[in-house]
Image (cartoon, grey):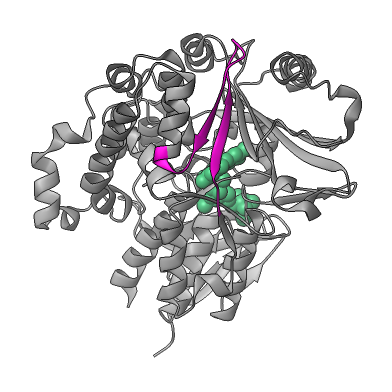
């Protein structure tokens, strides 16, 4: 019997995860990517002797990658060299204090006892609380689709539903953290995890406190060759399994007849497929690529806040800064105001929290001798036609001043190479709707149920994976989205 043919649009990490799994299950898989390489947001930028990861900089839940490789009979270690971080992130506060977030919980506990009024015991209790949320939700909400009845047919699922209070959806991240801790610096540190999917800690449900468990108890990693090596390894694995890649191939249309997907249109030509899996942002897919009226779905998704976007400066810097770690945060003074600006006023806060990632600290070949590659990012609202040229100028200065003030490093004259990423660039280069990184935000207690599912309820043969659909954004979750979508395709077409 002829193999069933699947088209995957987009070679982001979600699309790659699905491509590997479907090819491994015997499907004939073609991946169409508008750019000239795989990775999407997890790309690589090389200029003037510097190399940068374009987007993600930290890997959590490496088990998700391990599972993907072992599903194909491969050992992850033979394809990727993961390095566990000792200091996950170094936090700098406006009052001059510094906290190293050690991955080892006792060491982290000692650090917070040294620098704040919090006790090690409180930290341990907090991590136990985060673990409870993970244990109750991971299988149900990360590995399966909450929009499918079959998900609820296990004892574990029933038990989770009976313990809904323990997954903490009725308090916000900030409310829960403020009840655990008294020290505003530690509250700010843990509130920050809501930004991992572009959300507001003052609105997002405390269920997102699953993230500290994932980061500290399960470990945080970087990879030799930078995070981009994950995209490269998955593309290689897909090719080994027989996936065909078409680069510089921007799909124009998903053809639908009588509520059923027929194939795709590329370069004005129609190519038939049994099913189509879109790895592009779901709103972009419905608005620009599906050739039937999708107003109902678009209206439903548009009711919710979009997640944040980002302004990123990729700076090649002369000299080495000994104060900074691989990952660093320079916090804003008024976190609540920062999020109010981002989500309500839809402007960048004038004292933004700054994230600095320097991969050359663990991968020296990413920068010339005696130099470093600084990836400097601030959160922004999605693109609503702001004047990004002006914003770049304004925030370049604000960022440089804040770096100077916080870590006494005057780097302006040491920047010898520069490129910039704005929300518009993100939209153009990856298809993210208005440059929002993670689709709709999780600023709602029912967030887990509001994300678009990995399949279309109205169009047969149309599937979705990637950061804008279930289970959400970030490397491990988009890889799981590829798993959930490919499981659905396997079930229907095998
Ligand atoms: C600045 C930044 C920092 C981040 N930091 C982290 C981090 O530290 N840790 C973490 O886990 N995650 C992080 N993330 C999030 C993570 O990068 C994303 O969630 C993940 O990489 C998205 O994968 P995806 O499967 O959704 O695909 P995407 O990366 O969105 O890729 C979609 C692909 O579809 C292609 N495409 C779009 N339209 C078409 C078309 N018409 N035809 C063909 N191809 C098309 C695009 O070119 C793109 O390659 C960060 C993201 C950004 C932007």
Q: Is residue 247 above or below residue 50?
A: below
Question: Is residue 247 in sight in this rendering?
Answer: yes
Q: Quadrant of the N terminus?
A: bottom left
Q: Is residue 91 magenta?
A: yes
Q: Quadrant of the C terminus?
A: bottom left
Q: Is residue 288 magenta?
A: no
In front of the other: 163 or 239: 163
> What's the residue at 50%, 14% (across, down)?
335
Question: Is residue 199 in sight in this rendering?
Answer: no
- Magenta stretch? 84-106
Question: Residue 99 location in percent, x, y?
Answer: 53, 26
Question: Residue 234 location in percent, x, y?
Answer: 57, 66
Q: Total label count? A: 0
Locate residue 274 relative to residue 182 in the image: left or right.
Answer: right
In front of the other: 297 or 259: 297
Q: Is residue 309 above or below residue 289?
A: above
> What's the residue at 44%, 81% (across, down)?
73
């Amino acid at each position: 019997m002829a193999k069933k043919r699947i088209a995957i649009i987009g070679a982001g990490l979600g699309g790659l995860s699905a491509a590997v799994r479907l090819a491994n299950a015997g499907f004939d898989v073609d991946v169409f990517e508008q750019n000239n390489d795989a990775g999407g947001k997890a790309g690589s930028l090389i200029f003037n002797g510097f190399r940068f990861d374009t987007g993600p900089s930290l890997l959590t839940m490496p088990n998700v990658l391990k599972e993907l490789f072992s599903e194909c009979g491969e050992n992850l270690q033979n394809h990727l060299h993961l390095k566990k971080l000792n200091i996950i992130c170094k936090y700098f506060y406006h009052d001059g204090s510094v906290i190293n977030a050690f991955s080892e919980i006792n060491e982290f506990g000692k650090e917070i006892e040294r620098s704040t009024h919090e006790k090690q015991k409180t930290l341990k209790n907090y991590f136990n609380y985060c673990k409870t949320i993970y244990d109750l939700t991971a299988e149900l909400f990360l590995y399966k689709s909450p929009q499918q009845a079959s998900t609820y047919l296990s004892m574990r699922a029933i038990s989770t539903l009976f313990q809904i209070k323990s997954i903490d959806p009725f308090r916000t991240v900030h409310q829960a953290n403020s009840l655990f801790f008294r020290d505003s610096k530690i509250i700010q540190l843990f509130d920050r995890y809501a930004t991992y999917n572009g959300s507001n800690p003052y609105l997002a449900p405390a269920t997102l406190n699953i993230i500290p468990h994932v980061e500290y108890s399960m470990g945080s990693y970087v990879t030799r060759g930078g995070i981009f090596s994950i995209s490269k390894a998955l593309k290689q694995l897909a090719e080994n399994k027989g996936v065909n890649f078409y680069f510089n191939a921007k799909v124009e249309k998903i053809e639908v007849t009588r509520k059923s997907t027929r194939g795709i249109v590329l370069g004005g030509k129609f190519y038939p497929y049994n099913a189509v899996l879109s790895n592009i942002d779901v709103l972009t897919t419905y608005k620009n690529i599906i050739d039937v009226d999708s107003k109902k779905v678009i209206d439903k998704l548009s009711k919710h806040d979009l997640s944040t976007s980002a302004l990123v400066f990729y700076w090649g810097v002369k000299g080495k800064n000994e104060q900074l770690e691989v990952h660093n945060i320079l916090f804003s003074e008024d976190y609540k105001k920062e999020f109010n600006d981002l989500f309500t006023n839809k402007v960048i806060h004038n004292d933004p929290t700054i994230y600095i990632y320097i991969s050359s600290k663990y991968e020296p070949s990413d920068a010339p001798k005696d130099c470093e590659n600084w990836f400097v990012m601030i959160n922004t609202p999605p693109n609503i036609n702001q004047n990004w040229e002006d914003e770049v100028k304004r925030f370049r200065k604000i960022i440089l001043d804040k770096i100077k003030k916080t870590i006494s490093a005057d780097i302006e004259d040491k920047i010898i190479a520069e490129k910039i990423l704005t929300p518009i660039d993100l939209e153009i280069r990856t298809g993210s709707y208005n440059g929002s990184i993670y689709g709709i935000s999780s600023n709602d207690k029912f967030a887990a149920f509001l994300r678009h599912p990995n399949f279309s309820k109205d169009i047969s043969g149309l599937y979705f994976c990637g950061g804008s659909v279930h289970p959400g954004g970030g490397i491990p979750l988009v890889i799981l989205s590829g798993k959930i979508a490919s499981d659905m395709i396997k079930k229907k077409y095998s």
